[in-house]
Each structure stands twice: as structure tokens, then as C-alpha cells.
Amino acid sequence: MSGPRYTEYQNEIKGFRLNFSIACAYMGIILILLGVGLDYALYPQKLYEFGAVRLLVSLMIYGVILVMKAKWSRDATDMLSLLWLLLPQIMIAWMIAETDGARSMYSIGLYLAIFASSIGLPFSFWHNLFLSLVTFLFYIAVCALHPGSFVLHGVFLINVLFLAFVIAVSAVSAYFNEHTRYMLFRLKAELSRKNSELEETNRNLAQIKGQMLQQEKMAAIGTLSAGLLHEVNNPVNYCLMAMEVAMEDPVARVSDSLKECLMDARQGMQRIQHIVSDLKTFAYRTGETERNDFLFGKVADSALRLVGHETRGISITRDMPEDTLVRGDEAAVIGVLVNLLGNSALALHSAKRVEPAIHLSAAWRGDRLFVTVQDNGPGIAPENLDRVFEPFFTTREIGQGLGLGLSISYGVIERHGGTLVAESAYGEWTKMIFDLPRAG
């Protein structure tokens, strides 16, 4: 096994191997100290000598544990694990040499570490094979210290064959255990990737659904406003004509109050014409979206008229350059402004500010016109600031919104090659910034 994926696997399993090795090291200390009972049963005359060695080896293993717990030793987990596993093997080999050589019962203890490294510990094949071969050489060496037992028959040969059998079984187990852990890692990684793809698909579907809902709503408003424009224009024109005639009447000329009333009525009728015209521009769609050059200042006027009812009682100020000619989808940009201004108005009304205010500004930075809508409302909570553009995310009460407005607005600005960014000081203000390309 090799490659980038295997490297990722090695990096992920490091922590697991470290914790597992430390736990097994503690278990090893307990088993070594409990072996005093075996010393007492087999070689009581060496009880104190073997007990002192067991205590020394236990302290050495504990020292390795302390090193393994240090942050800098994480990359050396495998070598440190081999070290503490070799310590009891060396101790057992010494005990075999100090007792009966090949006939010593301590030879059984050599098998334990080999099995533990292959079946218990998450060791790799090569680490297990190294430990097994070193243990095998230890056994041959200590048996050589007993000429009577170092013969190719009897107990020595049986123990060698058993040890070889244990090494073979542990090596195969270590290989397939490692392969199984790697396959589980790949399965986990693949599942994580599929979940990420599914989440991305769900986000795209939610965005498409929101756009379709918005388009249906805009198409319905467009159809309605087109009919309104046709039906309302005639009576409004009659009213305007009648007001012009009335203002020329001698009575109106000599009555300032009557003349003022007629002028107010005329402005009201003109406002009706503007609102219906803005609704048509904002909502009506035929065929593919077109990109045209338009004055952003004119778009701002239309958006402010459309949210005039919502922004009643709110001070609105503007700061824009003389040249605001940009290129894009005029109706869609009006929709973005209507959404941002409407959100600000709603936040200001809910916060009940003494002097509610919205500031709409624009400034050129290179070939992009950066537009800012800022209010002195309650702001956005820090935990929600990164989520405001998520489809269906809303802090409003149920029934007061689907949480699609900002998501759709973000998509509109993104299609214009720009970004929609939210900034806020919680409890003080909220600022929405987006940019549009210069006409040309």
C-alpha cells in the first residue's frame, strides 16, 4: 500500500496508535509485575532477583510512556512502541538464560508480545515482523548459553518450531489487520466525500428551488403589474388632465390652498404611475435575461419607491457619484436593492430605534461600482453572520419569510461577477456591500 491516500491514512491513524500503545504499555507493566507469582511458583530461590528486574523493566516502560505523552514524540510512536515491547522480551530472554534454557517455562512469555503486536496493537506488517525476528534471535542466543539445550531435537526444536509458527501467524494477521484498517479508512473517506457531495447537491437544489420560487413570484407580479399599468394609466391620465384644467381655473389661481391641494393630488397620481412602472421593470421577464447598460442612480430611485411604504418613518440618505452607468440585469439589481432595503427597514422597525436611518452609497473602485446599504439597526449576531446567505436561513418568525431573499441576491450579484458581503457590529449597525461592472 502506498500513494497519497495511504499517507492520509498514516496521518489519521497516528493518534489512534499512540493512545492504544500507551494503554497496552500500562497493561504490560501490570502483567510484568503480576509475573512475580510465576517466579514464586517456578523459581522461588530467584524471587527477589527476578522481582527487582521486573520492577526495573516496569519503570523503564513507564519512562517510555512519559516520552510518548510528549507532543513532540507523536511522529515516533511506532519506534517507541517497539522499544517498550522489546523491553519485556529482553527481560524474558534474560530469565530464560538464568534458569533452564530451552526447558524454561518463560519461553511462553515470548509469544505474548508477538501476538499482541499483530492482533492487539494496530501495528504495520513490517513493525510486527521486525519484533518477531528480534525475539526469535533473542531465543536462539539465550539457548546457546546452555549447551545442553542447544541441540536440534527435543524441547529446543519444539520451541523453535512453535516460535516460527507464531511468527508466521502473527505476520499474516498483522498484514490483513493493517489492510482491513486501511479499507475502513478508505470507506470512511469515501463516505465523507459522498456526504460532502450530497450536501453540495442539497445546497444547489435549495438555491435552484429558491430561484424558481422567486421567478414564479416575479412573473406573477410582472403579469399583474403589466395589467395594472394598462388599466391604471388611462384613469390616471384622465385625472392628471382634469387637474391641469382645474389648476388653470380662475378660482384655483386665486386660492393658494386649492392650488396646493391640486398639486399634491397631481404628485400622488404621478407617484402611482411610477410605482406601477417600477413593478413592471422589477418583475416582468420575457425570454433570456438581458444585460444592458443602465444608471444605478435610476435603479436606486426605483427601489426606494418600491419600498416607500416599508421605509416610512426612516431617514434615508444617499451618496453617489455623478456617473453610475453600469452593465447588467437592471430588473434583477432592483430586486437586490429592494431586498436589502426591505431587510434594513424591517430590522429598524423591530428594533424601534429613536432615529432610524438607512444610508445608501456607491463609489467606483477601478471598473467596479461598489454599493453599500447601511442601517443603524440591531445588527447581526456573530454566530449568524456567516449564515445569512444560506438558502432558507432566517431569524424571522414562522410565516414572515422563507429565508431566500439574501441567498437569491447573492446569486444575482455573483452572476454579475461580484460578491455580496455582510458586515455588522452587533447591537449597532449592519452593512451590505456588493459590486457591479462598469458599462462598456
Image (tube, rainbow, N blue to C red):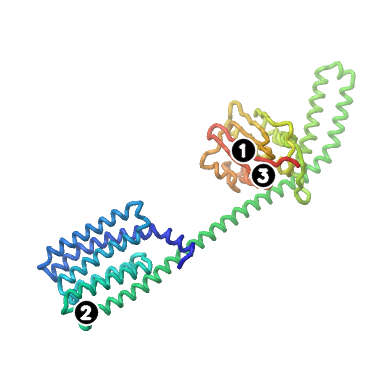
**CA distance for labels 3 and 2:** 82 Å
Q: Nearer the viewer, mark 3 or mark 2?
A: 2
How many marks the image carries: the answer is 3
Label disc, if present, on residue 226 of the rendered structure: none
- Left or right: 242 in relation to 33: right
Asked if one can make out residue 386 in the rendered structure from this viewpoint, the answer is yes
Q: Which amino acid does the dot numbered 1 rest on?
A: Met
First-in-chain label (3 vs 2): 2
Side of 163 relative to 417 (left or right): left
Task: Tell me the residue that label 2 is attached to.
Answer: 156
Could you tell me which secondary element the residue under label 1 belongs to? strand
Residue at image mark 3: 413
Q: The C terminus appears in which quarter of the rendering?
A: top right
The mark that comes first in sequence, 1 or 3, is: 3
Q: Are marks 1 and 2 in contact (CB under 8 Å)?
A: no
Q: Secondary structure at mark 2?
A: helix
Q: Nearer the viewer, residue 131 or 403?
A: 131
Measured from the top left, where is residue 398 in percent x and y? 58, 44
Tag 1 residue:
432
Tell me the kind of residue under disc 3.
Ile
